[in-house]
Structure formats: structure tokens, C-alpha cells
Image (tube, helix red, strand yellow):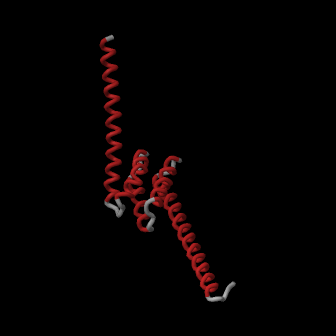
Amino acid sequence: MKRFLSASAALIAISLFSSAAARAAEENGYFELKKEIQQQRLTVSEIELISPLLKEYKNRSAGSGPVKEIIRESIDNNCRNECLKEAMRVMNRELARGKSPSEAKNTAANSMRANIREKRNRSSTEGRAARNSFEMNRGAADGLRP
């Protein structure tokens, strides 16, 4: 009985140690990825904003290449803060659906580009509406319109 208890205790200790070692390795991978990301042109607040999503990404055992690519592309397209956060969300969602990191990155990039186009179109439309309103008001002030 005594031998059984010490064998059980040893198995429990090994299990706890291996579990702690796995968590430490997981955390180390996240911190390495975060350090790599900090070398890109992100602000401290942007890094803090996406940190939980980076951790989720890294917990899926995904390589750092695709996530660095999506961050680089987002910076190049002036997709910052919430736009970047949304791209990271899409990437994690696609990984959860079983897509490869490369496929997830492509889906996130396509989503990001669509969001940027939509934002530009919305800005353009709002700008035209403001100009039209200004011209109508100017015409009314000049007595051209009732």
C-alpha cells in the first residue's frame, strides 16, 4: 500500500510538473511573439489592445509568421487600433474553425481590406454630402434658392 501511495504521489508530481512546464513554454512562446511584434511600428496601446488576441493565437500553437504578416499589412494599410483588433479576431476565429494559420491570415487580410474600402466609401459619401449641403446653404444665402 505504501509503495502504491508513493507511486501515485510521484505520478501526480510528474503530472503537475509537466503541466506547469507546458504552461511555462506556452507563456514563453507568447512573450517571444509579443517581443517580435513590439519591433514593428505599433504603439504601446495597440500592443496592449491586441495582447489577449495574440495570446489566444499563440495558444493555438500557430507560428508567428502569419500573425506578423497580418500586422505588417495592417500597418501598411493604416489599419490601426480597432481595425487591427478586428483582423486579429478574424484570424483567431478562422483558426478555431480549423483553418491553417496561412488560410486564417488570408481571410483576415481580405476582411481587413473590405473594412478599409467600406470606411473609405463611407468617408467619401459623407464628404460629398457635406459639400452638397454647404453649396445649398451658400446658394440660399446668395438668394439663389428659396
- Residue lying furthest right in this view? 146
Position of residue 72 measured from the top left corner of the image (x, y, whole percent)? 40, 63
Q: Is residue 44 above or below residue 117?
A: above
**Depth check, front residue: 52 or 138:** 138
The residue sitting at 34% across, 38% down in the picture is: 22
**Depth check, front residue: 112 or 69:** 112
The residue sitting at 52% across, 58% down in the picture is: 107
The residue sitting at 56% across, 67% down in the picture is: 118
The residue sitting at 49% across, 56% down in the picture is: 86
Asked whether, in this view, residue 104 is left or right of residue 137, the answer is: left
Asked whether, in this view, residue 126 is left or right of residue 88, the answer is: right
Position of residue 9 measured from the top left corner of the image (x, y, whole percent)? 32, 21
**Depth check, front residue: 91 or 120:** 120
Position of residue 24 measured from the top left corner of the image (x, y, whole percent)? 32, 40
Where the C terminus falls, by quadrant? bottom right
Q: Is residue 84 above or below residue 141?
A: above
Asked whether, in this view, residue 134 is left or right of residue 101, the answer is: right
Position of residue 14 measured from the top left corner of the image (x, y, whole percent)? 32, 28
Asked whether, in this view, residue 39 is left or right of residue 54, the answer is: left
Where the N terminus falls, by quadrant? top left
Numbered label tally: 0
